[in-house]
Image (spheres, rainbow, N blue to C red):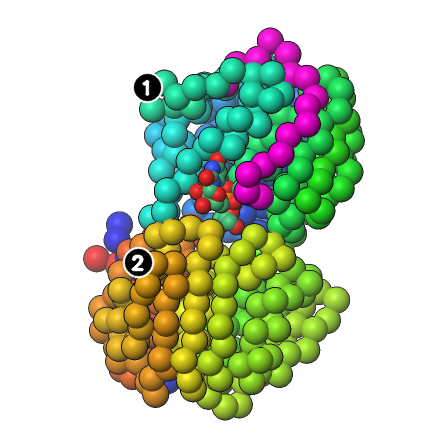
Amino acid sequence: MKDRFLVTGGARLEGSVRVDGAKNSVLKLMAASLLAEGTTTLNNCPEILDVPLMKDVLEGLGCSVTIDGPTVTINTPAVVSSRADFDAVRQFRASVAVLGPLTARCGEAIVALPGGDAIGSRPLDMHQSGLEKLGATTHIEHGAVVARADKLVGAEISLDFPSVGATENILAAAVLAEGTTTLDNAAREPEIMDLCDMLNSMGARISGAGTSTLTIEGVSKLEPTTHTVIGDRIVAGTWAYAAAMTQGDITVGGIAPRHLHLALEKLKIAGAEVETYEQGFRVRMNSRPKAVDYQTLPFPGFPTDLQPMAIGIATIADGVSVITENVFESRFRFVDEMLRLGADATVDGHHVVLRGVDTLSSTDVWASDIRAGAGLVLAGLVADGETTVHDVYHIDRGYPKFVERLNALGANIVRLTD
Ligand code: UD1
């Protein structure tokens, strides 16, 4: 069913909102449960479409999974199937997170190549070469990535780029390898730290989480665990930018503000007042935002997943902003939709120059991925009149109760179903 959102612009958002667990963590933690026979329990899981999709993937591999509100329980059998070759896998990118765990657990993984967001080419070369360094052979066959290993042995691995997904798959394989692995130029995202915490609580020996060098001493067996997923920094950042764009006042809970440090610093430069607490922050804005330049980079740089929000605030800022995308090359498709809303933007390679306009002008726009969809909703909040955002199934994949929570903060949004 293709739902759409009718967004009436003009409201100032005010109030409090709490974020749930991070989409980009929970899916990898669910995949990591394949590493140990028995019952793994994950708390603080977000109620988004990708969680039941990952449940389907794990059930296709022989696990039984129950989702009870924010608690996901996964029962992993002694023998899991190594073949993730079914429709659920193709539907979303994060399913590739089963590659490392299956290679370690079964000595073989056959994982259908995922689909996912239209944000640019997403090859698996670093996932494959990392597993190869650990002793696996890998190749692509009939639309699936195949990895095989009689045994995995620790190795020294350096990534060309600190890929989040490659770091996760290599970690999940190395924890059960014989001997020590060092992974250099590893991703430092908070979701990697969350995965390391869970793996260590299962009996893994990983040190260096949150730095660019991870050291993994392999163990022969892992035990199931109970783990609480970290808060979603991208959802929290979306609330922060919604507050600043609507000249509102929003307090966000359930998130460590250090996970969003640069995004909040940028809002301060734009003129917002930002207060931080141990597990939350408050963003207040009383004037038109000032123009600010952004460049997306791996953590602790500005997150590519908040780039649509940076573009959103820049379109209505006082002055000219330059936004540079360094992580995914096709993410500027979103700019075409912003042009339809009256943004004054020029794209040049991986830069976009935005000259702030006084107001956006409502029209019909189409979400092309999760974050672009959320960015279009924020733009609709500051456009004059009624903006219709189509293809909102993308947003449902990553933002729990988005419309309900925005309306509780004072927005005027209706979900329309054909
Ligand atoms: C994850 C997040 C995504 C976020 C991204 C960067 C999930 C489900 N998704 O995606 O929301 O935007 O991190 O923070 O967690 N690359 C290669 N070869 C590889 C792997 C990656 O060239 O083998 C490239 C990609 O094409 C991209 C860049 O590296 O240009 C970063 O990708 P990566 O960090 O791997 O992102 P994902 O894990 O796919």
Secondary structure category for the residue under label 1: loop
- Residue drawn at 36 percent across, 47 percent down: 120
Q: Quadrant of residue 17?
A: bottom right
- 397, 272: nearer the viewer: 272
Image position of 211 (left or right of 160): right
Q: Residue 323 location in percent, x, y?
A: 43, 67
Q: What residue does disc 1 label?
A: 142
Q: What residue does disc 2 label?
A: 333
Secondary structure category for the residue under label 2: helix
Give the amino acid at mark 1: His
- Residue 156 magenta-highlighted: yes
Q: Earlier in the sequence, mark 2 or mark 1?
A: 1
Q: Residue 11 location in percent, x, y?
A: 41, 83
- Residue drawn at 35 percent across, 52 percent down: 330
Give the amino acid at mark 2: Arg
Does the image show residue 112? yes
Span colored in magenta: 147-162
Image quarter where the C terminus lies is bottom left
